[in-house]
Image (spheres, grey):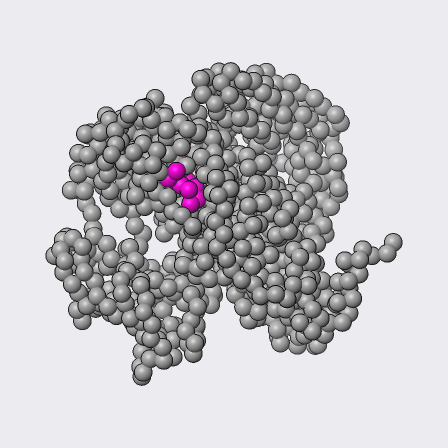
Amino acid sequence: MAPAPETDRIEKLLDRMTLAEQVSLMSGEDFWNLPAIERLGIGALRVTDGPNGARGGGSFVDGVRSAAFPTGIALGATWNPELVERIGAALAEETRDKGARVLLGPTINLQRGPLNGRNFECYSEDPVLTAELAVAYVTGLQSRGVAATLKHFAANESEIRRTVNSSDVDERTLRELYLLPFERAVRQAGAWAVMSAYNRVNGIHAADHRWLLTEVLRQDWGFDGVVMSDWFGLHSTVEGAVAGLDLEMPGPPIQRGEKLIAAVENGQVPRDTVRAAARNVLRLLQRTGGLDDLTSRREVENERPATRALIREAAAEAMVLLKNNGALPLPEGVRVAVIGPNARTARIMGGGSAQLNAYRRVSVWDGLAEALGGERLTFAPGCDNHRFQPVLEGKFRCEWFDNQSLSGEPIHIEPVSKIDRMMDAMPDGIDPLRHSCRISGSFTTPEAGRWRFGLHATGRARLSLDGEVVVEAWEGWRRGRTYFEEGCDPVTAERDLAAGQRLGLVFEFATKPTYNLHFHAFQAGAGRVSGAPEIEAAAEIAARADLTLVCVGRSAEWDTEGWDLPDMRLPGAQDALVEAVAARARRVIVLLQTGGPVEMPWLDSVDAVMQAWYPGQEAGDAIADVLTGRRGPGGRLPQSFPARLTDAPTMIGDDSVYPGRDGHVSYAEGLEIGYRHHAARDIAPLFPFGFGLDYTGFEIGAPALETRGNGHVTVRVPVTNIGERPGNEVVQVYVAPAPAPLPRPKFELKGFAKLALAPGEAGIAEIALGPRDFAYFNSTVQRWQIEAGNYELRIGASAQQFSSVINVELNADTWAVDSSRSCPGAWCS
């Protein structure tokens, strides 16, 4: 059979390319772009960070504006693949606006425990829910010609020492849990790109891992796309190339370029390996329409009303009503005290590479004022929830030096409006990795009180007020947990200041050698310290209102790439604030915004709890929609909420399990993460996986079962809305296995269906299961196996609420990992 025309063209291009040109396609030209090969008419390829928006190639926080979508855990809470597919299609338009053809998302690692700083970016603790949403996201994105990038491959479930730690996990656990979403997104959705993780897997860096990148990804699953490194995540020239890593990012190359050419010429890397990698990159260019595109890549702002509406819809559908003693939806004419640090500050996204400059940031206050009228609202912050002090802003002068000692004359002077810089474009003549700068101006206190000043930086830094050094990390700088573990821990100091006091301010920064990620950044801030008087003032305002909404949670400073949370409590004095308000207010609703579970010592003292996550740029309007009943709370928990941190699966052993010891993290819990862990140890969660209330009620009827061949099962479940409002129900099917020679979880989610029903309306939830849904992986014989026997299908509305159980009798069966039958789920043939 003759090759397809597009394949033939790629092969002819490869034939015409020199070794150096092929190697040039195996690394970036700069931070976001691959080089063009103009001699052959081959266009350049631009990528952009995702997954909850397309940031473009500018600053992490101040670049060209983009649409901010709900974060991963919020999309996970929707349990709605159709909605996520629509979001994928909208993200493709956003990506094109930024001149890019590849979006770096979705993030489909699992929520192994509650403290991972990047849990907000992931969909779920469960591989099947994650896989369903990943398939939808990839399908929507690539339907518009933009490549999805599955990340981070694989076993990247913690941010602590992520660039050096080894995730030590057995093959069965990898195959059944951590690899399954990647497998589904490759085999079912045909993902065009994969990003290797920073961490090592069983001692080998993921970017050098031939078993992962070639044997599993390409040979077992048939992947024919591009495998790229995470940024600065490739540590070898020969090993990564031979393992199957196509693309080193970012550029200019560190491990490739001339080093790789030399490795080919001396026989360490076969020429066919380079040709194969170049072929994969050309195929990606072709798939995304960029093979012949030599035009400039301009970034534009293009705010679409339809996208705003979609974000608002998805944000509402993500919200999970955890408790409601009749306080919600808000009654007509109610006077509401809006309390808390997240009330007037819009918490729309997490931190790290997922952040962007959003078109809009609608706060809870703004949304409620629009929905109810501002005259019916009162406000008090009560406390703060800062990890860092608010960034110092003003009219400052920045002097840049081409040395690390602030010596001589500055080679560039510019005005700046804040003391906060991360991966921004550098002035001409300034080496991004070797420079110093001085920012000077003044700071005037808006009110009297005790003020806290703080800084953190990837190099030496100090802040002076009226000539006195107030905070410094200069001679004593130590690498800590900020800026992806390239920066020091925050350094703070406090001063008592009068209102209107004007102080001369000087901030100085000097680079030092980087550790692993080669960039520099700094931030300095100041904030008034709050305490008991502010909490008392909030409680007094709450006492005078008909109802109080307490807006608490975290922010992008806490839920962020590059570090893990210190505990599972609300930061600062927020628990004390909720308790004080609950003691004085008539009715109390707690609105949570976090990237994962938190302890709730005040739960019995409040009337309602709503988890809103980080719902994107339309946050406040979507929250108001749900609080007022314009929309129902459509979400269900994608992650179990333990009652306390010690109940979490990563807390079952010593520090070798979490956060790791001597460079190794032992996945000793095996398959028992999330609800599997709670079931295995009979530990009651605070709220179970899959749980969520609605403003209406549902009756789940008796299921009907259709079988067609061993392991092919369709479950049909009647559902009726028995309340007076429209709402959503998620019918979940868990499989409890027959006895097997290897231990298996008590039950596992294998399928679900979400129904939107009007009052009195009935519908049928149809869930199809396939052989893999009953099988386990036997690593000894390298086969998937079904044991003969009786399997229970547990059907219900959460991992702890089953309305019915039906039995399926199966025969023994087995098949190889690379068989067409080994693809997971009911879509297998």
Picture layout, residue 739 above or below residue 287? above
**Residue that appears at 75% across and 36% down:** 829
Percent x, y of residue 164: 49, 60
The residue most toward the bottom is 408
Percent x, y of residue 732: 56, 27
The residue most toward the right is 1
Give the side of residue 827 with respect to residue 150, left or right.
right
Picture layout, residue 70 above or below residue 748? below
Residue 614: within the magenta? Answer: yes
Count the numbered circles shown.
0
Quadrant in which residue 440 is drawn: bottom left
The residue most toward the left is 498
**Residue that appears at 48% across and 39% down:** 309
**Residue that appears at 55% across and 45% down:** 90
Which quarter of the rendering shows the N terminus? bottom right
Percent x, y of residue 653: 44, 43
- Near-viewer residue (476 or 325): 325
Give the side of residue 665 with respect to residue 736, left or right.
left
Quadrant in which residue 393 is drawn: bottom left
Asked whether residue 198 appears in the rendered view, the answer is no
Percent x, y of residue 679: 50, 30
- Near-viewer residue (122 or 25): 25
Residue 246: within the magenta? Answer: no
Asked whether residue 288 appears in the rendered view, the answer is yes
Give the side of residue 819 with respect to residue 100, left or right.
right
**Residue that appears at 58% across and 45% down:** 89
Picture layout, residue 234 above or below residue 168? below
Residue range corresponding to the magenta coloring: 610-621
